[in-house]
Image: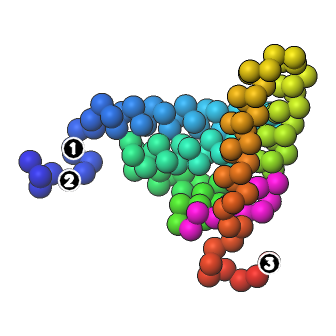
Amino acid sequence: MTDMPPEARRKTAREHAWTAAGFVCMGLAGIGFALPLMPGFVFLLAALACFGRGSPRMRARLLQHPRFGPPLRDFAEHRVIRRKIKRTISLGVLSGLAVTYAFVWPRFIPLAAITLILGGVLIYVWTRPARAPDSPED
């Protein structure tokens, strides 16, 4: 049974769940790229992680995408998020937060929770290096 090629092996329920989560993240990324209120690239990173556990074929397709593949490969190989992407994510998060404050004010608990979550996203994004260690200076 162990000499079976990987493509002949049946997926486990856990792998199916990770693959489904990857597709959900891809959908959220699509919404994020269409609306300025959601950071689409963050959801692509999440999809990449989910597909890494559930569907290596979909992960490879994401990494080979002509537009999103290079920054996703930067992250997958070196944990790098390019400066331009950091700015775009920050702009999306901050504009989303502003809209949330406009509609949810004065309910403190939801605002505090959303602010903490989005603040954590920004801290994570801005603490990643902006270029790979072996890349030339900007």
The quarter of the displayed image where residue 70 is located? bottom right
Q: Are marks 2 and 1 in contact (CB under 8 Å)?
A: yes
**Residue 67 or residue 32, whichever sits in front:** 32
The vertical placement of 54 against 100, above or below, is below
**Residue 85 or residue 67, whichever sits in front:** 85
Task: Give percent across and percent down for residue 120.
Answer: 68, 44
The residue located at (81%, 48%) in the rendering is 90
Residue 138 badge: 3
Rate crowding at label 1 as few (under 14), some (14 to 19) or many (20 or more) other CA atoms within 10 Å.
few
Task: Give percent across and percent down for residue 116.
Answer: 72, 36
The residue located at (47%, 43%) in the rendering is 50
Between disc 2 and disc 3, whose residue precedes?
A: 2
Q: Which residue is mark 2?
A: 5
The residue located at (83%, 25%) in the rendering is 100
**Left or right: 15, with 100 as reference point:** left
Amino acid type shown at disc 1: Arg
SS type, badge 2: loop
Amino acid type shown at disc 2: Pro
Q: Indicate yes or no whether the magenta region holds residue 81.
A: yes
The residue located at (50%, 38%) in the rendering is 22
**Left or right: 71, with 52 as reference point:** right
* Region in magenta: 78-87
Amino acid type shown at disc 3: Asp
Q: Could you tell me how far apart the alpha carbons at marks 2 and 1 are, in whole angstroms?
A: 7 Å
Q: Which residue is mark 1?
A: 9
Q: Name the mark nearer the viewer: 3 or 1.
A: 3
Rate crowding at label 2 as few (under 14), some (14 to 19) or many (20 or more) other CA atoms within 10 Å.
few
